[in-house]
């Protein structure tokens, strides 16, 4: 997982699965907040993958159940 960080604005993006996605977030931030200029010290940092938590597991289980039901209905 990767985050874009801007030390000028003191912000850190939400984590992205790829470095490219974090870099795109940084490009958007530069365009909006810094008129396309590169803030000194901006960077992409690696953060550990945290995996689904709490209610996120419930959404995954419901989605998997719906897919299974759709496959069963389609079979018969
Ligand atoms: Zn900034």
Image (cartoon, rainbow, N blue to C red):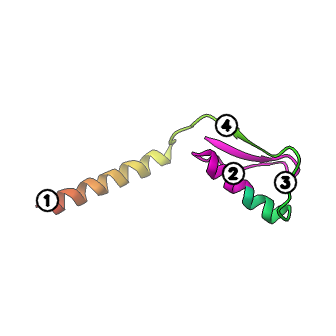
Nearer to us: label 3 or label 1: 3
> Quick check: is 13 in the magenta stretch?
yes
Q: Circle 3: is it few (<14), some (14-19), or many (20+) Cα within 10 Å?
A: some
Mark seen at residue 46: 4
Mark seen at residue 23: 2
Q: Circle 4: is it few (<14), some (14-19), or many (20+) Cα within 10 Å?
A: some
- List the residue tagged with mark 3: 38
- List the residue tagged with mark 1: 75
Contact (CB < 8 A) between labels 3 and 2?
Answer: no
The CA distance from mark 3 to mark 1 is 55 Å
Question: What stretch of residues is rendered in magenta?
Answer: 1-26
- N-terminal of the pair, mark 1 or mark 4, is 4
Q: Is residue 37 above or below residue 61?
A: below
Q: Quadrant of the C terminus?
A: bottom left
- N-terminal of the pair, mark 4 or mark 2, is 2
The CA distance from mark 4 to mark 2 is 12 Å
- N-terminal of the pair, mark 3 or mark 2, is 2
Contact (CB < 8 A) between labels 4 and 3?
Answer: no
- N-terminal of the pair, mark 1 or mark 2, is 2
The CA distance from mark 1 to mark 4 is 44 Å
Q: Quadrant of residue 30?
A: bottom right
């Amino acid at each position: 997982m990767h985050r874009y960080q801007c030390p000028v604005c003191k912000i850190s993006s939400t984590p992205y699965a790829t470095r490219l996605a974090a870099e795109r977030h940084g490009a958007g931030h530069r365009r909006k907040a810094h008129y396309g200029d590169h803030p000194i010290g901006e960077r992409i940092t690696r953060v550990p993958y945290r995996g689904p938590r709490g209610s996120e597991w419930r959404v995954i289980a419901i989605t998997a159940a719906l897919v299974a039901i759709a496959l069963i209905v389609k079979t018969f």
